[in-house]
Structure formats: structure tokens, C-alpha cells
Image: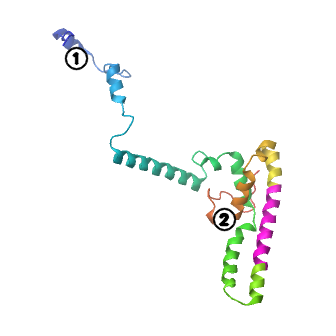
Amino acid sequence: MFGRSKTTNDKLADEAHEAREGAKNRPTPRRRDQEAARKRPLVVTDRKQARSVDREKRREAMTRTRQAMLTGDDAGLPPRDKGPVRRFIRNHVDARRNLAEFMLPVMVIVLALSFLRTSAILLAVTVLTYGILLTAVLDTFLMWRGLKKRLVEKFGEEAASTRGNGMYAAMRAFQLRRSRMPRVQVARGEYPG
């Protein structure tokens, strides 16, 4: 309205420019047009659509995390499993035969035996339950002491004394080898160096 209209010479000049290799070959967009294109409302008006977009983003993030848990990819792991110290702990626990990982199958047997109501069997079940529990706890404690020494050698004193590393190793030791997440990456006896 207030600007001048293009003359025939201007139109011919625009058409005369041929496309160059490596050049932009288009006019620079106006700032107000770019800002208008980027504008989004603070509160979404279509809640149903926003919920479905959010659900899809969460599903993609969970898929990436699950894939990282299966492959051991450090970039996609959750924060509790990230880092070289946690990888070292996982590999050390996975390389070792832990008594604690056999506790669940033994407890299933104990549960089956507890249905038999004779005093001798109930005494055996009680002794077996507390015996396996105490030996598993003792084995896990000794495993953590040895692992802590190796952590100090490899990563220094602060890595071994970081809060939560002992519980992380113990919880991994009490899980069945097949059900551990992130998945086991080393064979038995293949301790990390």
C-alpha cells in the first residue's frame, strides 16, 4: 500500500538472476515473518492433541532407554547406570558367581517345602532360609570389599566412596543373571581390567 510497486525493470532484474551453486537463491525472510512462524501459545488449546504428542515423546524416550539397556550404550542409559565407575561395578559383579543370585530359586523350593506341615521339614525350611540369607549377605559383603579395593586402584578414593555404589553392586548381585538390566556384557570369569 505505502511501498512502491515493482516496475518492469525490477521484475526483469529479479528474473535475470540465475541460480548459483552454493548461493541462497532466495530473498532473506523478514524478521516479523520469522517471528510469527515461531510463535506458539503458552497454554495449548488442544489438550487432547498435546497429550498424544507428549505420550509419543515419552514412548520414544523409553524405547531409546530400553535399547541402551539391552546394548549397554552409555549415552542412553538412565543416570543411575551411567559412567565408567558404574560400568566397572556391573562388569565385576557379572563376571563373578554370586551366592545371592541363587537365593530366589532356593526360596521357591523353600516355599514349596513350607506347605508340608511336619515339624522336621519346617525346622529344615527355617534353617535353610536363614542359612542361605546369611551366606548371601556375607558373600555380597566380601564381594563389595574386593570390588572397593579395585575401584580405588582404578578410579581413586572418591569413586569408591561415592554414595550408592555399594548398594548398586549388592542389588545387581541379588538379581538373577538373565534378568539384570543393563544386560550382562561380560562372560563369567572375565573381570574388568
Instruction: Identify the residue at image location x=66%, y=83%.
Output: 112
**Within the image, what quadrant is residue 123 found in?**
bottom right
Could you tell me if residue 156 is visible in this image? no
> Closest to the observer: 181 or 104?
104
Farthest bottom residue in view? 118
Instruction: Identify the residue at image location x=76%, y=56%.
Output: 191
Residue 173 location (% of width, % of height): 72, 62
Q: Which mark is residue 178?
A: none
Queried whether the magenta region covers residue 102, the answer comes back as no
**Within the image, what quadrant is residue 7 found in?**
top left
Q: Which residues are magenta?
A: 127-145
Residue 119 location (% of width, % of height): 76, 89
Q: Which mark is residue 15?
A: 1
What secondary structure is the magenta-colored segment mainly?
helix
> Closest to the observer: 64 or 161?
161
Instruction: Identify the residue at image location x=79%, y=48%.
Output: 151
Secondary structure beneath dot 1 equals helix
Queried whether the magenta region covers residue 133, the answer comes back as yes
The amino acid on which the numbered mark 1 sits, given as a three-letter code, is Glu
Number of labels in the image equals 2
Quickly name the residue at label 2: 177
Left-right relation of 78 to 158: left
| Color theme of the render | rainbow
Q: Sequence-wise, which precedes: disc 1 or disc 2?
A: 1
Left-right relation of 127 to 28: right
**Residue 40 versus residue 144 in the image, above or below:** above
Left-right relation of 29 to 113: left
Q: Nearer the viewer, mark 1 or mark 2?
A: 2
Farthest left residue in view? 8
Q: Quadrant of the N terminus?
A: top left
